[in-house]
Amino acid sequence: MSKTTKPVLGGLLAAVAALLSSAAVAQTTPWYPLPFDGKTVAGEEGRFDYTPLSASEKATKPWNICVSLPHMKDPFFLAMNYGMTEEAKLLGVSVQTFDAGGYAQLANQISQVENCVAGGADAVVLVGIAREGMENLLSELKAKNVPVIDAVNGVASKDTAARVLTSPRDEGFRAARYLAEKHPAGSEPVDIAWLPGPAGAGFVEAFNTGFQEGLEGSAVNVVETKYGDVGKEVQARLVEDLLQTHPDLDYVVGTAVMVEGALPLLRARGIQDRVKLVSIYTTPGVYEMMKAGQIEAAGAAPVVLTSRVILDQAVRVLENKLEYSDVGTLGQVYTKDTIGTLDPLSVLAPNGFRPDFAFRP
C-alpha cells in the first residue's frame, strides 16, 4: 500500500464510521416527548407532550393492526410506513399496510379494510380517501368491536376510537402566513401563483381554505390558481403556462412536486433568483433544495413522528390505555437559514427505505 493510499483509506473509514455513528444516534435517540395540540379523553383541550407506551413497555400481546393508505406513491406515505414500522418494532405488534391505489379509489379502500378485518385485524388505522363515504364501514367495524384510528386526513364519521391528524388546512395556512408576514398590508404588493394540486380532492380544498385565511391582511396578490394532478410533468406544464401568462410573478407557491418540477424551468429562463418558490410540505427533493438555498421556503410536518403516535394510539385503544382522544401534531415553515434545525428523520423516511407492507415482530 502506498503512502498516499493510507490517508485516503483512513479518511474513508473515518467517514463511514461517522455515518454509522450518526445512524445509531438517529435510531436510539428518543423521539418523545412530542408537543401537540389536542384533547384528553376527559375532554380537556390544550397543548400537551406525547410519550408513547414504548418509552417503558411493549404491547401486552402481538396485536395485528391494519393500516389503510390512499396510495404509496409519494414520500409522505412512505414516511408514514417507516414511522409505523419503526414503532411496531418497539411495541412488538404486527402491521399490515394496504395501498388503495389513489384518491379516486374509495370503493377499493373500503373493500381492503373489510378484507383485512375479516382476516383477523384487531384494529384499523384509516387514512381516509374521502371525508364522507366511510360512515357505513366505520359503523360496521364499531359493531364488531374493531377500533378505528382516524389518521391524517380526517373522516366525518364519529365511529372512531381516536384521531391523529396532520391538517392540510394548517399546512396551507402556515405557508400563507410566512408570505403575509414577509409582505404585510401597506408594503409593496407581490404577485403569486398558487398550485395546490388536483381540483376537488379533499386535501386540496383544505390547503385552499388555510391558504386563503393565511393571506388575510397582507400585500400578497394571487394572480392565478391552477389545479392539476400531483405529477411532476403535469405540474411543470402548469408552471410553464403561468410564466408565459404572468411574466412578472414574484412567487410560485404549491405542492412539493410542483416546486421540484418548477426549479429547472426557472433556471432555464435565468429567473430562479427573481421568481421564488415556496412548498407547503417537504419531500426529499425539496429538503435537498432547501439545504442548497435554491428555494425560498418549505413547510414541514413531523410525518414520521406522527405515524409513531398513530400506531401507539392504536395499541393504547386495544389495551384500554388511551390518554388523548385527539392529537394534532405541529409543523412549521423552514427557510435556507433555519433548515439546519430540522431533523430529516422526523419528516422523511431514510434514503433507501423500501415500504414494508407486512411487518411482523
Image (cartoon, grey):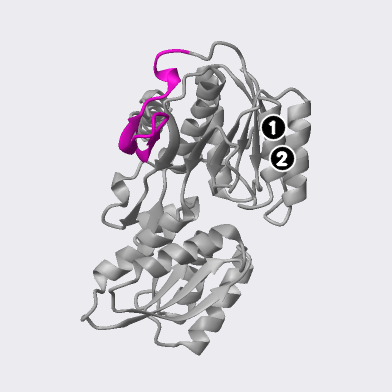
**Around disc 1, counting alpha carbons within 10 Å, would you say few (fewer than 14), some (14 to 19), or many (20 or more)?**
some
Residue 92 is left or right of residue 182, and the answer is right
Q: Can you see residue 194?
A: yes
- Residue 42 vs residue 96, the one in the foreground: 42
Furthest residue toward left: 186
Residues drawn in magenta:
36-57
- Residue 260 vs residue 85, the one in the foreground: 85
* Coordinates of residue 122 in the picture (x, y in percent): 66, 23
- Above or below, comparing residue 25 to residue 4 in the picture: above
Q: Are marks 1 and 2 in contact (CB under 8 Å)?
A: yes
Residue at image mark 2: 137
Q: Can you see residue 352?
A: no
Residue 210 is left or right of residue 244, and the answer is left
Q: Is residue 37 magenta?
A: yes
* Coordinates of residue 118 in the picture (x, y in percent): 78, 27
Residue at image mark 1: 141
